[in-house]
Structures are given as C-alpha cells and as structure tokens.
Amino acid sequence: MDAKNPKYRRWPLLLLALAIVLGGVLWAVSRRPREVTVQVYFVRVDPATHQGTVVPVSRRVQAGEPRLLLRAALEALLEGPTPEEKAGGLSTEIPPGTRLRSLEIRDGIVYADFTREVESGGGSFSMQARLWQIVYTATQLPEGTRVRLLLEGEEKEVLGGEGLYIGEPLPRPPEMPQF
C-alpha cells in the first residue's frame, strides 16, 4: 500500500462521508415522532335500562409532554367516534363545532377552555354525558387528576341551561357515572 497513491488517499474521505451519512440517518430515526395510546371516552346507552355511561376507547397520538397528550386526547374526543365505534353502540354528546381553545396543567388541575358550542343544545342526559366525557378524557394522566372547564376563557359556575355545576375543578368519581 503506497500512501502516495491517489486511490489510497480517497479511503479516509470515503469513510468520513459514510460516517456523516450514517450519523444523519441515525439522528433522523431518533427524531421520528413516536406514538402513544390515550383514552377517549364516549357514551354507551344500555338498551334495557336506557341508562348511559362513558366508556374508554383507545386513540394513538404523537408522544409529547402531558399537556400535549391531553390536548390530543381531547381533540380526538371532539372528532367523535369512528364509524365502527358508532356501529358498536358508541356515541358522543359533545355538540358539533365544539373546539378546544386551550389547555394547561397547573398544580394537578387540567384547565380546558372550550368554545361556547360545548354547552349548546341537549338536555339533562346530554349535559351530564358531555361533562363526564370531558372529565374522564382530561383526567387520565397523573399530572392532572381534576379538570376545570372554561368557556371562551371564562370560569363559569354551571354548564348549559340544565345548570350542571362546574364551578370548581372536577375529579373522576370513584365509580363510572350513570346518567
């Protein structure tokens, strides 16, 4: 091997180029977003008793800090059940057009700010169902075990004309609610 031979001087450059390319590929793979599973709560009505409750379904969302995970879960909730889930008897009581304006987690409380549509229409069954859909979806992580609902940035005492109390952060009840 003659170091003065030009064909041998190219090897270090080729090895360096290969190392740069491999390093770039490894960096890109490590930066690829990964998915995690969150729970979204929809409504199921027992045909025999006509009572409703909320039931979890899984959604895959991009991994991230707890605030981003809960935001993705609540946005999936607002999208509603899939056609397959509807065929399986699941529904949502959250009115179409409802949007999540913002979401923050402070001192174990999830502050979820929705547009006014969240309180439109319904009745007692519908209001209870949508409230529990939001509470259960928003309180699935240990960083936020209670949720404070805001409407258009304002803290309210009640939700809708039915007057469901939302004047303080709400935890999940010990047992699934029936409504």
Image (spheres, helix red, strand yellow):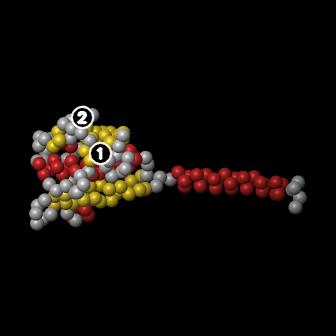
Q: Which mark is residue 146?
A: 1
Quadrant that contains the C terminus: bottom left
Report the residue at 24% width, 34% height from top.
Answer: 155
Residue type pointed to by label 1: Arg
Percent x, y for residue 26? 59, 55
Work out whether residue 132 can be spotted: yes
Question: What is the distance, in whole Å, between disc 2 and disc 1 at their CAs?
Answer: 15 Å
Dot 2 surroundings within 10 Å: few (below 14), some, or many (20 or more)?
A: some
Work out whether residue 74 can be spotted: no
Q: Nearer the viewer, residue 124 or 170?
A: 170
Tell me if 131 is positioned left or right of 22 in this view.
left
Dot 1 surroundings within 10 Å: few (below 14), some, or many (20 or more)?
A: many
Percent x, y for residue 172? 26, 51
Report the residue at 75% width, 52% height from top.
Answer: 13
Tell me if 45 is positioned left or right of 7 in this view.
left
Percent x, y for residue 120? 16, 42
- Residue identifier under label 2: 155
